[in-house]
Image (spheres, rainbow, N blue to C red):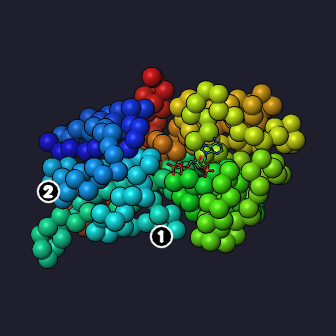
Amino acid sequence: MKKYLVIGNPIDHSLSPRLHNYWFKENNIDAVYEKKQIKESDIEGIISEMRNGKIDGINVTVPFKKSVLPFLDEVQIPKKTQSVNTIFIEKDNFTGSNKLIGRNTDILGFKFSLEHIKYSVEGKKIFVLGAGGVTPSIIYALEEMKPSNIMLSNRTKEKAKDLKKLFPQLEIVEWGDTKNFDMIINTTSLGLKENDKISIDYDQIGSEKLFYDVIYNPKKTNFLLEAEKRGHQIENGKMMFAYQAQAAFSVFTMAPDVLEGLKPEVNKKVIELLEND
Ligand code: ATR
């Protein structure tokens, strides 16, 4: 039986096991997918278990998407994103040993989540809040979708400036300032706690904007609730989560020398599965 794992801290909330185990069953694959809370110092050990063939694939979540990088043999990610969320094994043709390869499926996850709601970023003004681990993946995906501009605001301005070094087109905005935008994306962790509030002036924002929150638990953060009250379109991170998992599943089920594995549908059943707590 094959074994897969999602590692992170915290990890309790992760819906990855539920989704991947469902897809394994649907596809009659003899595999089990578990979650494991780890510390930074555990990464090396877990990766070596993978090298020894005890684990067949790993998803990485907050806050280790960057810290796994040095332990991998190869990364197939846009360098600017500095983020791996999926690790798989490839047999080295010459030595026969296991080669560990990292990918980033958050980029596709974000893109497909917008396709799912038929939202076109092309020519739009985008306002990104935050400069954490997932932010570069989102900016990378956005740039591919040709917005007119991307503004970025983060409490710690230094981190916003670091991102601008990687993505020179970014326009840095002071934390707390509200700008004119078509779509605003919360990539901060603000909203995970019930009392978390993002300090933007909701009443200064015109109508019919898209408010997107990467957080999916709670389903509606204060940010989304405030937007909904004012009639804006809202979207949480659930579909991004589902599509990054779909892309990871495809990686995990790749046959040797084949570029793509199984691509299970993200259908009503899957969405229901993610909704039942
Ligand atoms: P990760 O990399 O795991 O996503 P992170 O690097 O701690 O986590 O990033 C979390 C994001 O949420 C950051 O943009 C962080 O802002 P800072 O860079 O200023 O820390 C943002 N964030 C977290 N708590 C916040 C708060 N109370 N107010 C404003 N921003 C906050």
Q: Image height check: is 244 above or below 148? A: above
Circle 1 residue: 79
Q: Is residue 190 left or right of residue 169?
A: left
Q: Residue 31: which quarter of the image? A: top left
- The amino acid sitting under disc 1 is Lys
Q: Position of residue 173 (x, y in %)?
A: 76, 57
Q: Earlier in the sequence, mark 1 or mark 2?
A: 2
Q: Nearer the viewer, residue 175 or 255?
A: 175
Q: Secondary structure at mark 2?
A: loop
Above or below, 93 relative to 14 = below
Residue sitting at x 43%, y 58%:
66
How far across and how far down the image is residue 112, in percent?
54, 50
List x then y, in percent, for residue 237. 55, 40
| Residue at the (79%, 32%) spot, across then down | 231
Q: Which mark is residue 202?
A: none
Residue type, mark 2 in image: Asn
Q: Residue at x 18, y 45 (%)?
A: 2
Q: Of residues 82 and 123, which is closer to you in this image?
A: 82
Q: Which type of secondary structure does the marked residue at label 1 adopt?
A: helix
Say if residue 33 shows up in the picture.
yes
Residue that carries the numbered disc 2 in the rendered image: 52
Residue 238 location in percent, x, y? 52, 37
Q: Is residue 40 above or below residue 270?
A: below
Picture quarter with the N terminus: top left
